[in-house]
Image (tube, helix red, strand yellow):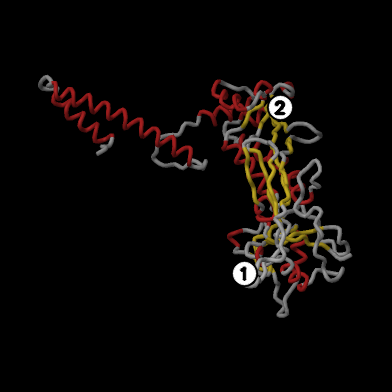
Amino acid sequence: MTISIDEILTEQQAIADLGETRSLTDEEIQKFEELESQLKAAQKTDEIRSRQRAYMTPVQAAVNVATTKQDDTLDRAFNHYLRTGKENADMVELRAQAEGTGSEGGYLVPDGFRTKLIERMKAFGGIANVAETITTATGNPLPFPTVDDVANVGEIVAEGGTFASGADLTFGTESLSAYKYMAGGGSNLPLRVSVELLQDASFDVEGLVSRKLGERIARIQSTHLVTGTGSGQPKGIVHGLTGIEIAANTAVAFDDLITYIHSVDPAYRDNAVWAFNDASLATIKKIKDDDHRPIFRPADADLGTATGGGTLLGFPVVIDQAFPDISLSSNTTNWGAFGNLFEGYVIRRVRDVVLIVNPWTRAANGQVEFTAWARMDATIQNSNAYIALTGQA
């Protein structure tokens, strides 16, 4: 039976106490040395278990509990690098992962900073929060097969007979690449932050940099996730789709919304959402039922409404400002989407985020420059799962 570290130490102490009044016997010495071996094995086992738990546990915010202080050496080294642009010996791990860019001042960022950056990008555009997102370690082309077999059915056959019609499965293919997005400041220049601001010990440097760089990357990514052409950029969620038209070019009516809902196969409606911009939501909020009640149902006030936060005819509403406003008299402008967007649209992100900190170029001006790289692609993976909303020809 395995005994705990505390039990081993208690037995060792009991033997050591005997040695205070007399010499230990050979048997007692042998027992103490056996306990020493057991202690080393138990300590090593605990260390391995702790390391494995660290591997399996997602990165979480620090909580003030009575536990052993975690090693934050790398985070502190990275924070120092953000403030000064000067690396130290603790940055070697990040340099080794950067595939040569470390010599130019570039480093893959720690998980905590990367998470902040990605959260900023996701929160900026609503589509990124509801589409399927996969993360890969590298940016190699990622092909995946597609198949549309809904037109084929089985048949009744006579006893001893066989089928008379049918079709083989026809597979297509889609591929996700990894477009490199760079984030910086205005006028094609890096994001510049004053040395005074960075050296303020109470200032959250990581928060500032992740927020601003995340916003800059997110603005262009969110646009591409909605209207990207798929040529030299990701394919947007409504790009190239033939939208479902409204009945008249005067206003979006209650009946139009019913048409939209039932234009999506019931198989995809269980997890369906609406997606459009805030101006379109304002227009739709004015639609009332026969009892003059708004058809939009706000969410609980505690949940907030920044990204819709309510339901429209029983389906959640997602707001993404990259969608154009409702276009009533044009069926070439897809102003929204409805359906199972998680099933229909996929976003691929490459895990590696590289950050460039340049304290030299603007040293005379007392500024440090920051630039980030993030790689992403997206495409339609199942066009049956949702529809585009458009105006009337």
Residue 334 coordinates in the image, percent (x, y): 81, 58
Residue tagged 1 = 160
Residue 322 coordinates in the image, percent (x, y): 76, 51
Write the residue at 27% across / 30% down.
38
- The amino acid pointed to by label 2 is Gln
**Secondary structure category for the residue under label 2:** strand
Q: Which mark is residue 367?
A: 2
Q: Which mark is residue 273?
A: none
- The amino acid pointed to by label 1 is Gly
Q: Nearer the viewer, residue 323 or 247?
A: 247
Q: Earlier in the sequence, mark 2 or mark 1?
A: 1
Q: Is residue 311 visible?
A: no
Determine which quarter of the picture holds residue 328. Answer: bottom right
Mark 2 is surrounded, within 10 Å at the Cα level, by few (under 14), some (14 to 19) or many (20 or more) other residues, namely many
Mark 1 is surrounded, within 10 Å at the Cα level, by few (under 14), some (14 to 19) or many (20 or more) other residues, namely few
Determine which quarter of the picture holds residue 205. Answer: top right
Residue 253 coordinates in the image, percent (x, y): 79, 71
* Quadrant where the image shows the N terminus: top left
Q: Is residue 140 above or below residue 92?
A: below
Labels in figure, total:
2
**Secondary structure category for the residue under label 1:** loop
